[in-house]
Amino acid sequence: MLYNSPNPLHLWKKLGTSLLCLALIFLTSLAKEAAPPEKNSLPPAASTKVDFKRDIQPILSRNCYACHGASTQMNGLRLDNRNSALSGGYSGVAIKPGNSAESKLIQMVAGVIQGKIMPPAGEPLSREQIGLLRAWIDQGVEWPDESSSVGKEPTHAPKKDHWSFQPIKRPRLPVVRNRSWVRNPIDAFVLSRLEREGIKPSPEADRVTLIRRLSFDLVGLPPTPEQVAEFLADNRSDAYERLADRLLASPHYGEKWARPWLDLAHYADSDGYEKDNARPHAWQWRQWVIEALNNNMPFDQFTIEQLAGDLLPTATLKEKIATGFCRNTLTNREGGVDPEEFRIEQVIDRAMTVGTNQSEGILSAFRILQYRQRSQH
Ligand code: HEC
């Protein structure tokens, strides 16, 4: 046929066209197969009957509740009880009972929705786990009432058995064998533990060592040679107690013990960023802390004045200076800084500084500071 053709070029053209058609058909069929890519890349549903408590709840609680549980519902989605789970999140229903392939939850954990996968960080769910979730949805989203968290919400009431809420009680003094070693009630506790461990107390340190230790502990400075001589020459039975009283009364006591608090409060004499401008008045708050310690200010007053001294009725200048605590955040004075973004950063820094590891503490501190910062702008 080829050789019979009067025009080989024409023939090539014909052949080319049919090849092109073939290729097109082939490609179209490929495209057809790839049309719903989501469904094809979903792991198959497990073929067994699933049991919510055994198969499903552990997957959800381990991988999802941190962000979709009782305390946090990212994108409005809560997955720790049937009703909330079925009502979905901000973008609508996430579980379609009987149809796992069309359920957003499955598509999200399988990572077939572009750029999104749940959980968003850490190990993705295994194909087996996704298969179980699929079977659970296909089998009608069984969820026994007793596995539902409804009615078991955290109440946000303080835990009554937490140590800090216990009334202060005088503990009974432990009974010890070597009673002559005990000079004050605290010694009894120390000795009772040593005796339980079968350890003898060390002999008392010599007087020069004692005054050095006590000086470093209370004022952060070594004793002068005169102070050492004076202590060595003091023959009274309460010479050590007198030394402790003298050091506690020293103005250096507040300087030494303000330091950990200044560190915790992020105290600095300059902005701490970029131009790092000086804060010419920052020392006033530092001085307030030193004086508070030297004057033995009670801790509740110490806390109230630093958080809100300026809001006290007829606040004094000192009480206002105390709130310098709230101003210790790193300050960014760069040209391009977004004031609102930076205000939020400051609020968070202060909330973290005030709060302890207890999220409740952080939250209430955050509210106070949000309020404060708003009233300052
Ligand atoms: C670290 C937090 C985090 C964890 C853990 C997490 N998610 Fe999410 N989830 C998010 C965030 C954030 C979004 C919003 C994402 C978006 O729309 O881009 C979201 C959205 C979703 C949505 C869509 C909700 C809607 O209406 O928009 C589903 C469904 C979902 N997650 C399921 C899960 C499942 C199932 C798990 C556990 C296997 C899980 N997520 C674990 C943070 C998390």
Image: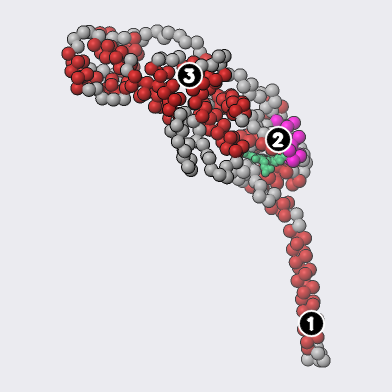
Instruction: Give left or right: position of 259 versus 235.
Output: right
- Depth check, mark 2 against mark 3: the one in front is 3
Q: Circle 1 is placed at which residue position?
A: 13
Q: How many marks?
A: 3
Q: Which amino acid does the dot numbered 2 rest on?
A: Gly
Q: Which amino acid does the dot numbered 1 rest on?
A: Lys
Q: Circle 2 is placed at which residue position?
A: 76
- Depth check, mark 2 against mark 1: the one in front is 2
The residue stretch that appears in magenta: 81-94
The Cα atoms of the two marked residues, 3 and 1, are separated by 96 Å
Instruction: Give left or right: position of 140 versus 178.
Output: right
Q: Badges 2 and 1: C-beta atoms under 8 Å apart? A: no
**Residue 251, visible in the rendered structure:** yes
Closer to the camera, 356 or 328?
Answer: 328
- Bin the neighbour count of mark 1 within 10 Å (Cα to Cα): few under 14, some 14-19, many 20 and up: few
256 in the magenta segment? no
Q: Circle 3 is placed at which residue position?
A: 318
Q: Residue at x 65, y 46 (%)?
A: 117
What percent of the width, then of the height, locates residue 254? 37, 21
What percent of the width, then of the height, locates residue 201? 26, 18
- Bin the neighbour count of mark 2 within 10 Å (Cα to Cα): few under 14, some 14-19, many 20 and up: some
Q: In terms of secondary structure, where does tag 1 sit? A: helix
- Depth check, mark 3 against mark 1: the one in front is 3
What percent of the width, then of the height, locates residue 12? 77, 84
Say if 141 sits above or below 326 in the image: below
